Each structure stands twice: as C-alpha cells, then as structure tokens.
Image: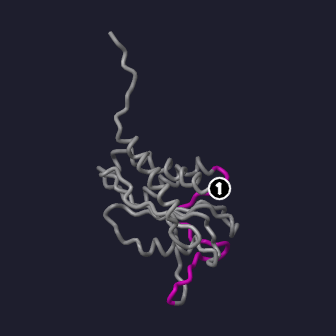
Amino acid sequence: MEDREILAGLVASTMPLMADERYGRLKIRERPIMHRIAVNLEQYFSNWEVDTEYNRHGDDVKRLQRLSGGTKNIEPDILVHIKGEPLANLLAVEIKLSDNNNIDDDIFKLEGLTHPDQGFVYPVGVLLQLDFAGKAVLICDVFRAGGQNEELTGWLRDAFEKAIEDLKRPSRGCVRGT
C-alpha cells in the first residue's frame, strides 16, 4: 500500500469526528477520539488490525532506545499492524488535542517506530493535533525512516485543509421550484 493511500485513509477516518459538533462542544478527551478514529480506520485497512495503546512487540513490551542510553516502554495511540508479526506494520498515529502542546514524547515514539534500526519499521507515522471547536488540524506531521518527511507532511496538510474546507462549505441540496 502506498504512503498516500495510507494517509488518505487517516484523513477519511478523522473527518467524521471533525464534522460532529459534539466533539468541540462537549470537550471530549483524547482516548475516546483515538478510539473513534481507530474504529473508522478499520474500514480502510480491512486486512490489518487497528489497535489503540497497544504496547506489545511479539511477546515483549514495546520499547525504544533513548539517545541518552537505556530504553523506554511505549504505548502508541493508534497502530495499524498485524499482532504477532514483528514486521507487519503499516501506520502509527499519535494524537493530541488543541489544549495539549506536549508533543516531545509523541515525536520520540514516531521517530522510533519508523526508524529502520529500532526493529518496528512502521512505514508511516503521523502526529495529529486536532482542534474540534475551531474545526482545524493544527499539526499533521508525517514521519518516515526515523524522521519527519516534509513531502508527505505537505501532502497530508493539503489533504486535511481540503477536507476541512469541504466540511465548512454549506451543502447545496436540491431545491424544487414552485
């Protein structure tokens, strides 16, 4: 599956939540949002498993090497993968809401999960920061091969901007003349 196909599935899975006025009004928190996006992702990745906060790598706990030495156990927000198959990984997503700018740990996870030397080799990782009240995607950074990928980040930003624009555009139903 191509990177842009994967990212398009993420956009399509996120937009129903952005369209739902309740998410901004009720100030729904990160975990239910992760869950809803994961449920939506299942229809785009039918041959894959979609999990939230899945912390296993085979029989072991998911761990990443720290630059300063040692390891850190991790629980990515959303993973598209096949459990028990160490290299059957497709997408890792970290989600933040507009009132939480603490993204350093999320970047660490996405760099590690996509880095070829860490043992996970997710082809694509995405950091999303969502503003439901403002109907905006504040951050949509794409990670590949252990670092941010500017080309795919630009593509994803454009895809979200177009989807948000379409969402804000008033629908034009058929009007019957008299």
Amino acid beneath label 1 = Trp
SS under mark 1: loop
Is 110 in front, or is 27? 110
Q: Is residue 168 above or below residue 46?
A: above
Q: How is the image coloured?
A: one colour
**Residue at label 1?**
48
Which residue extends farthest front?
151
**Residue 123: which quarter of the image?**
bottom right
**Residue 96: which quarter of the image?**
bottom left
Residue 164 position in % (x across, y down):
39, 46
Q: Where the C terminus falls, by quadrant?
A: top left
**Residue 163: which quarter of the image?**
top left
Please give the name of the residue rendered at 69% of the width and 68% of the height, measured from the top-left corner: 87
Please give the name of the residue rendered at 55% of the width and 84% of the height, measured from the top-left corner: 71
Q: Which residues are magenta?
A: 46-68
Is 164 in front, or is 133? 164
Residue 83 position in % (x across, y down):
66, 64
Please give the name of the residue rendered at 50% of the width and 47% of the height, measured from the top-left corner: 12
Is 7 in front, or is 82? 7
Residue 140 position in % (x across, y down):
44, 60
Q: Is residue 158 above or below residue 114?
A: above
> Is residue 153 on the magenta stretch?
no
Q: Is residue 21 above or below residue 66?
A: above
Is 31 in front, or is 121? 121
Please give the name of the residue rendered at 52% of the width and 53% of the height, measured from the top-left corner: 10
